[in-house]
Amino acid sequence: MNSIILIPPVDSLSSSGDGFSYFQVAPILGESETVLLGEVAKFVPLSSNRFSSISTSASGAYVLAFGGAAGEVVTVTAAHAESGELKRFSGTAGADGKGIITVTPL
């Protein structure tokens, strides 16, 4: 991972009136300008508890190893750093709760 990108903050107010800002930092993968946003519906979209490794395949794709419940489908979102193009990639956990997601460069 060569760089990171800072996603604009989400500002909110709690029920007590205290404000906070939520920032997300996302890695840019290799020279492809592909930004890995992760599981965007989750508060921590790229948790090390969920994703155990990321590697590059011979074809230049990025392979994310993940853990989950047997049969669980995990979907991550990636974006192109320049164009903003979004694409989703999914994988299904096997009987052992482990799975992979292959992310092709955008």
Image (spheres, helix red, strand yellow):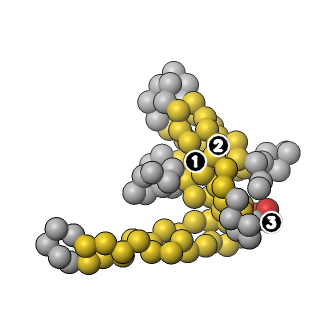
Left or right side of 36 for 95: left
Q: Residue at x 50, y 54 (%)?
A: 40
Left or right side of 33 for 25: left
Disc 1 secondary structure class: strand
Q: Quadrant of the N terminus?
A: bottom right
Whether the residues at callouts 1 and 2 have beta carbons within 8 Å, the answer is yes
User: Which numbered circle lies on residue 76?
Assistant: 1
Whether residue 61 is visible to the viewer of this picture, yes or no, is yes
Measured from the top left, where is residue 21 in percent x and y? 36, 76
For badge 3, the amino acid type reads Glu
Label 1 vs label 2: CA separation? 5 Å
How crowded is the residue under tag 1: few (<14 C-alpha within 10 Å), some, or many (20+)? many
Front position in the image: 19 or 28: 19
How crowded is the residue under tag 3: few (<14 C-alpha within 10 Å), some, or many (20+)? few
Measured from the top left, where is residue 84 in percent x and y? 68, 64
For badge 1, the amino acid type reads Val
Between discs 2 and 3, the one toward the N terminus = 3
Q: Residue at x 63, y 46 (%)?
A: 88
| Residue at the limit of the structure toward the left, as seen here | 16
Q: What residue would you read off at disc 2?
A: 89
Left or right side of 45 for 58: right
